[in-house]
Image (spheres, rainbow, N blue to C red):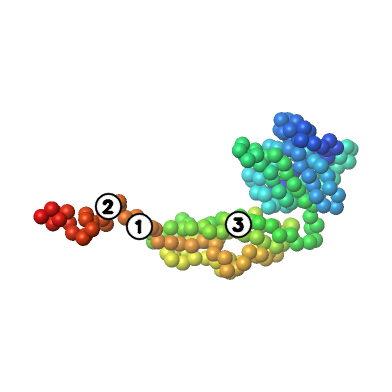
Amino acid sequence: MDAVLNAEVRSEKGKGIAHRLRQQGLLPAVLYGEEQKDLILNTRELQKLLSTQGSSQLITLKVKEGRKKQEIPVLIKELQYHPVKGNLLHADLYQVSMEQEVVVKVPVVLVGEEERVNDGSVIDLQLYEVEVSCLPANIPAKIEVNIAGLTMNNSITLADLTPPSGVQFVTPLSETVVAAYAPRVEVAEGAAETSGETGEPAEAQEE
């Protein structure tokens, strides 16, 4: 599914303008690239795109500037959120060339867990995203890691994975992606304690 985002060029700037836009369900944004443009986005449209496509996918930005309309391939550069409320405050986008490779972070997704033999181990995902290099059109939505054969006290590193066609890993191949550990055994409180400094049972001490 192609990611599409609508935008309108804005001429007004300032904190007051930004606050007014947010009250209207709109989001101030900036497009960087061949020409910097101040934009207005629809907050809900962007949130829906983020929930379905993620923040690292190529986006076709449909920009309206007066009567002029154009489509620009962009990536999300940065998203600013309210530190307390968590709502979107601002978005930075940057224009990309479809002929030049970009470096982006892609989420890691585990598959095959239902096929694993239950050996009592605990699965620990250590690398939640992987940095890759590729042409914008080849950006993968995710990096799948099959853990069907992962057994206790073993791990899968990035070197064990094969990147999608046209994609290269930038993250060091030595990085551990996921590991299987023996579960920690918690000793019940007081179970290993002895009464008294000598370590003798309480009854013996009383005698």
* Residue bearing mark 2: 190
* Residue bearing mark 1: 185
Q: Residue furthest right?
A: 67
Kind of residue sitting beneath label 2 = Gly
Kind of residue sitting beneath label 1 = Val
**Label 2 neighbour load within 10 Å: few <14, some 14-19, many 20+:** few
Taking the image as shown, residue 150 lies to the left or right of residue 48, namely: left
Disc assigned to residue 129: 3
Taking the image as shown, residue 19 lies to the left or right of residue 66, namely: left
Q: Is residue 21 visible?
A: no
Q: Position of residue 138 (x, y in %)?
A: 71, 59
Judge depth for marks 3 and 2 and give the one in front: 2
Vertical side of 151 occupied by 46: above or below: above
Q: At 69% from the left edge and 57% from the top edge, which residue is drawn?
A: 104
Q: At 69% from the left edge and 52% from the top edge, which residue is drawn?
A: 57
Taking the image as shown, residue 58 lies to the left or right of residue 157, namely: right
Vertical side of 50 occupied by 99: above or below: below
Q: Gap between marks 3 and 1, in whole Å? A: 30 Å
Q: Quadrant of the C terminus?
A: bottom left
Vertical side of 165 occupied by 7: above or below: above
Ranked by sequence position, the earlier of labels 3 and 2 is 3
Taking the image as shown, residue 190 lies to the left or right of residue 121, namely: left
